[in-house]
Every structure is written in structure tokens, then in C-alpha cells.
Image (cartoon, rainbow, N blue to C red):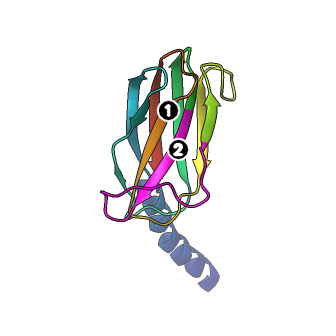
Amino acid sequence: MKKILLALLLLALAIPGMANAAATTGVVTLLNAQAISAGDTYTSSTVNLTNAEGLISWYIELTGDGTASFVYQTSNDGVSFAEPEGVTAVVSGFTKTSGGSANGKAMEQISVEFARYMRVLVTETGGAEAIAVTLKMAVR
């Protein structure tokens, strides 16, 4: 009987923690079918990472005949941004036929260096055709 009560007590203590972990995941839309001309770069809005922990997930959707590159920058003050040391494009050469189903849609997981703020730069790298990009980011 004591073992059953102890098991129930432990279960009751664990459930709120699991619910809290799920409730703290948020999704931010950084670009919503944003048009980017050939050869241009678009800078997303700034995301506050103060309470973020662990991996970050990006959902990318691209239409148009161009090619995209995705790079992130970090900042401690929300004003001065830089690409972290040694970081290159998270995604490059992305087209409307990229992604797991070759449909211009993909999920990417990234580990971001410790910083308070982040933003994403999307560049049309083909130089000849425009693109439209949707980028949603999930943080925990």
C-alpha cells in the first residue's frame, strides 16, 4: 500500500512539470510569405531569447524560382548584431524543390550560441529570380 501511495505521489508531482514544459514552447512567425527580390537580403524581426533553452526549430517554406540562404545573427543588447564566430549559413541553396518532400518546405533544428536576442537574414542567392519565404521559429 505504501508503494502505491508513493508511486501516486511521484506521478502527481511529475505531471505538472511535464505540462509546464509543453506549455513553454512558443512559435514566432519571422517572415510571412515575404517577397525577396533577386540578389536582395531581408532581415527578420528580432526575437528575445531570454527564456529560451535548448534547440531552436525553424519551419521554412519557399516559393518562386530563386534560391535562398538563411543565416542568423545574435546580440546582447538588441541593437548591435553579429554572426557568431564560426557560424555559416544554417541553410543554403534552398529552392522550391528543396526539403524532405522536394516541395520547398523543411524543418531545421539549430543550436544557437548563448545570447539575449536573435534575428535571421534571408538572402536570395541565385541573383536572377525572386522568392517568397515563410519562416516560423519554435523556441522552448
Q: Name which of mark 2 and mark 1 comes first in the sequence.
A: 2
Circle 2: element type: strand
**Which residue is rendered at x = 61% and y = 23% of the image?**
95
Circle 1: element type: strand
Asked if 101 appears above or below 69 in the picture, the reply is above
The range drawn in magenta is 69-90
Q: Quadrant of residue 99?
A: top right
- The three-letter amino acid code for the residue at tag 2 is Val
**Which residue is rendered at x = 50% and y = 54% of the image?**
83
Task: Tell how many labels.
Answer: 2
Q: Residue furthest bottom?
A: 2
Q: Main secondary structure of the magenta part?
A: loop
- State the quadrant of the N terminus: bottom right
Alpha carbon separation for disc pair 2 and 1: 8 Å
Dot 2 corresponds to which residue? Answer: 71
* Pointer 2 with pointer 1, Cβ within 8 A: yes
Residue 54: percent from left, percent from top: 54, 61
Front in this rendered view, residue 79 or 91: 79
Front in this rendered view, residue 36 or 139: 36
Front in this rendered view, residue 8 or 125: 125
**Which residue is rendered at x = 58% and y = 57% of the image?**
111
**Which residue is rendered at x = 47% and y = 67% of the image?**
17
Identify the disc placed on residue 76.
none
Q: Is residue 82 magenta?
A: yes
Asked if 16 appears above or below 80 in the picture, the reply is below
Dot 1 corresponds to which residue? Answer: 123
Asked if 40 appears above or below 18 in the picture, the reply is above
- The three-letter amino acid code for the residue at tag 1 is Thr
